Amino acid sequence: MASKAIIGLIIFLALSLSSVASAVTLSANPPAQYTVVKGDTLWDISAKFLHNPWEWPQVWKHNNHIQNPHLIYPGDVISLCLVGGETMLCVDSNMNAYDSANNSRTLYPHMRPQDTSEAIAMIPVEDITPYLNSPKVVDQHDLENAPYIVDFAAEHIIAGAGDEIFVRSILKADSLSYTTYRPGLTYEDPDTGEILGYEALFIADNIILEIGDPATLRIITTKREVRRGDRLMTTSEDHAVMNFFPKPPTMKIDAAIISVLGGVSQIGQYDIIVLSKGKQDNLEIGHILSIKQTGKLIADPFHKNKNELVKLPNREAGIALVFRVFDRVSYALVMSATRNITVLDRVSTPEI
């Protein structure tokens, strides 16, 4: 439930720049002030003021005036200001009423109910929502030993929502809900050739009607047509972790981009990439990684040994935010892209 109200004329979100200069660097040309509008994200706003947008917790964590300094609302005005002779980063939350329908602000003192559902998101959640629960990455054992569809109750070549299916070897009800998957890509480490996992594509949701061999289930919803041979696993009850704050890993990470989700070929901002490191490599949800464009291998026509091959250096190409982690691979959202990014480009711990 939302708290009743938040009172105050000006809420200060940071210490003086002199006291945090060693930890936080301002962007090259920060605006004097910025009015938050619907559709903004905390990341976008932080990027206007900070060189490294993920460093906003280092600025706001010292604020003792509000219960949750990470809740920012449309109509809030964030600005550089002078207080007691010191430069501060401030937010004016109460002197300006925001009309979301007309995207306008009315200047007068007021009490604002703090409904957290109206707060702007940390990142563009709509871009990662489809990938929070599916597809999943499993090992070969998970796929080979999962129950599979042997036939349909009706005489169809493919099945859809409402159809009943017969599934081998569900002899006890571990769950009432089962998810149908189909093998997708095989994820391989480009450095070692080792198989890191197998993509399991979401096909359908089902409920169990009768256990047995075969068991009987009914298809509830589908994303793709259901086929004989598709595999079933109990429906995951994992809840997406969204209450995290971005931070660089404390250890050195060096991984490759091994795939991109969503059927795109050119990787850009807000695309989903698959990384060749996971839980076993100490990657965590919320980790920020620097994307490096892999330097080309070119022939040097001017060298005394004609056309000697030269490897050009890797170059900074963007920032990625890890939002889902499996044992040996991870999903990450491209937060910014300053150069062309392709599969086999690298990601690493940012150099701060």
Image (spheres, rainbow, N blue to C red):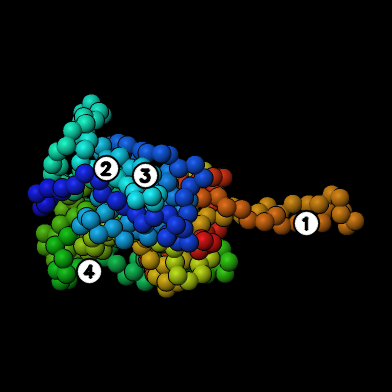
Q: Most extreme residue toward the right, as rendered?
A: 304
Q: In this view, does 98 lie to the left or right of 138?
A: left
**Residue type, mark 4 in image:** Ser
- Disc 4 element: loop
Q: What residue is shown with label 1? A: 309
User: Which of 140/226 is in front?
Assistant: 140
Camera-near label (3 vs 1) is: 3
Residue drawn at 45 percent across, 42 percent down: 30
Q: What residue type is labelled 1?
A: Leu
For the residues carrying marks 2 and 4, which lies nearer the camera in this image? 2
Left or right: residue 25 versus residue 61 is: right
Which label's residue is closer to the chain start, 4 or 1? Answer: 4
Q: Which of marks 4 and 3 is nearer the N terminus?
A: 3
What's the distance in space between the residues labelled 4 and 1, CA to CA? 57 Å
**Label 4 crowding class (10 Å Cα cut-off): few <14, some 14-19, many 20+?**
some
Is tag 3's residue or tag 2's residue first in the polypeptide sequence? 3
Reply above or below: 174 against 313: below
What label sits on residue 92 in the rendered view? 2
Comparing marks 2 and 1, which lies closer to the viewer? 2
Q: Which amino acid does label 3 sit on?
A: Cys
Q: Distance between the residues labelled 4 and 3?
A: 67 Å
The residue indicated by pointer 3 is 81
Separation of marks 3 and 1 at Cα, in angstroms = 54 Å
Q: Residue at x 38, y 50 (%)?
A: 85
Horizontal and vertical percent position of residue 165: 20, 55
